[in-house]
Image (cartoon, rainbow, N blue to C red):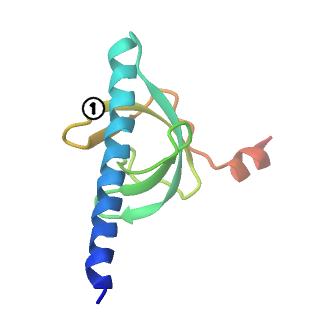
Amino acid sequence: DINYKRGIGFIKAAKMVQRKSNEYWLFEYIRRRVEESDDDVEFQATVLGCVDPQRFQYAIYVYELGLEHRYLSEKGYLQTGSKLSLKVASVSPIQGLLTFALSSKYIGRSNSNTAAAA
């Protein structure tokens, strides 16, 4: 007899290992960029939505990295679709931690608002 449940467990475990490995190497890439740069390492991101309104925690998408990530806004409320310029505040591939801070080049508007203003 074939135990399909056991096989599914192995597949789930393998996917988790693959996801963690991808995260580690992405964070290591960012760490190396930070280490090699004399300036802040910055990325453009879009606010996808609010995850926790009381903590001002948002889901963001970082274009260059193809990364969906959580971001705690120091500006407070952010509108879904807002564009942000973020700098790497800290990164630890081993611990799986990446934090961003708002860059001095804060954009703050969505494309539709920017286009309407032009």
The spot of residue 67 in percent (x, y) is 47, 47
- Residue sitting at 31 percent across and 85 percent down? 2
Q: What is the x, y in percent for residue 76?
A: 38, 51
**Residue with the most extreme left position:** 95
99, above or below 46, in the image: above
Q: Quadrant of residue 37?
A: top left
Q: At x 27% / y 74%, what residue is drawn?
A: 9
Q: Secondary structure at mark 1?
A: strand
Q: Percent x, y for residue 72?
A: 33, 49
Q: Amino acid at mark 1?
A: Ser
Q: Which residue appears farthest toward the front when viewing the image?
A: 1
Structural crowding at the residue carrying mark 1, measured as other residues with C-alpha within 10 Å and reported as few (<14), some (14–19) or many (≥20) = few
The residue lying toward the viewer, choosing from 63 and 76, is: 63
Q: How many marks?
A: 1
In which quadrant of the rendered image does the N terminus lie?
Answer: bottom left
Q: Which residue is mark 1?
A: 90
Residue visible at 52% across and 45% down in the picture = 66
The residue located at (61%, 46%) in the rendering is 109
From the viewer's perspective, is residue 4 above or below residue 40?
Answer: below
- The quadrant the C terminus occupies is top right
- Extreme top residue here? 38
**In this orientation, does residue 74 appear?**
no
Image-based side of 79 in relation to 55, left or right: right
On screen, residue 28 versus residue 60, left or right, reads: left
User: Can the viewer see residue 64 in this picture?
Assistant: yes
Classify residue 78 as left or right of residue 23: right
The image quarter in which residue 58 lies: bottom left
